[in-house]
Amino acid sequence: MRFGQPHQFLEKDDVRLASINRAIAQFKFSAEQLKEPYLHRVDEHTVLFIKGFGNEINLLSAFRDIYFNSRELLDLLLGRISQQTASSGNQTPKDFLPFAKRLMRGDFDNFNLEIISFLKTNINYIFHLRKIRNEIKKNPSSVEFLFNTDHFEARMSLPIDKSDYELLEHLDIANLDAAKMKFSYACVINLDIAFPEMLEFWKAAFEIQQR
C-alpha cells in the first residue's frame, strides 16, 4: 500500500528533472549569499573582477546534482531510443560512446528521427556533461568556483582518453592539438547559464523523443 497522493510518485525521468530543478534553486540561493559581500566592488565601471571560492561545498553540491542527474537522464534517453529502434535491424547502442561514435558517422541518419538529429547537433553538450560528471565522481576537489564580474564560473581540467579520439573533431575544445599532447584540456562553465539551460535541454530532449 502506497501512502501519499498519485502525483507524489514520479517516474524516473521526472525524479531526475525535479532533482535538477532543486539543484538550480540551491545554486541560486548559494550564489546570492556568496556574492553579496562583494557586490559593492562591482559596478558599470568595473573592467574585471574575480573572486575565488575554491571548491565551495554548497556550489559543489548543486553542481554535482545537475551533472549526476543529467548523466542518468542521458542513459535513460539512450535506452528509450534503443527500444524505439529495436526492430529496425540497426538498433542503437545504449552505451554513450558506441552510440556517439556511430551517431557522428551518420549510421542512424536513415531513421529520420528528430531525436537523432537533436543529439547529433548537441554532441558537444552531451559529451561534456558526461565527461564533467565522470570527473566530479572521480575527483570532486578538481572543480574551482569563481565569481567573475557578473556571473559564477566553474573551472576544471578534463582528461582526454584514447576512446574519445574519434569524437574530438566534432567537439568545441580550444587548442585541440595541445590538448591531445597533454591528454587534458581546460573547461570553464558559466554557471548562471548552465544551471537553467540544463533543465531546458532535458525537457526538450524527452519531449522530442516522445513525438
Image: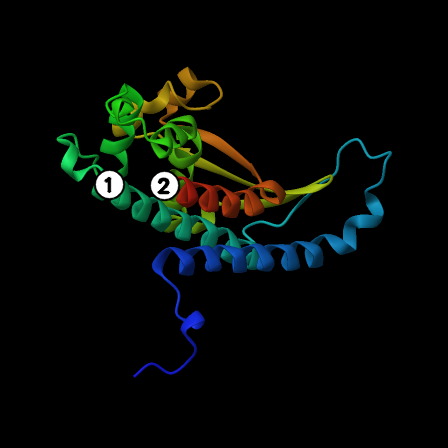
Residue nearest the observer in this picture, 167 or 1: 1
Residue 165 spot, x, y in % from top left: 30, 23
Cα–Cα gap, marks 1 and 2: 9 Å
Whether residues under marks 1 and 2 lie with C-beta atoms below 8 angstroms apart, the answer is: yes
Percent coordinates x, y for residue 40 in the rendering: 84, 49
Looking at this view, name the residue that lies furthest to the right. 45
Q: Quadrant of the C terminus?
A: top left
Crowding near the residue tagged with mark 2, few <14, some 14–19, many ≥20 C-alpha atoms within 10 Å: some
Residue 7: which numbered mark, if any? none
Which residue corresponds to mark 1? 84
The count of marks equals 2
Residue drawn 27% across and 45% down?
80
Horizontal and vertical percent position of residue 140: 43, 50
Residue 15, x across and y down, in percent: 41, 61
Q: Residue at the spot x=24%, y=26% of the render? A: 102
- SS for dot 2: helix
Residue 162 vs residue 108, the one in the foreground? 108
Point out the tag, 1 or 2, that comes first from the N-terminus.
Answer: 1
**Type of amino acid under label 2:** Gln
Q: Is residue 47 left or right of residue 30?
A: right
- The residue where tag 2 is placed is 209
Q: Closer to the camera, 142 or 23? A: 23
| Badge 1 amino acid | Gln
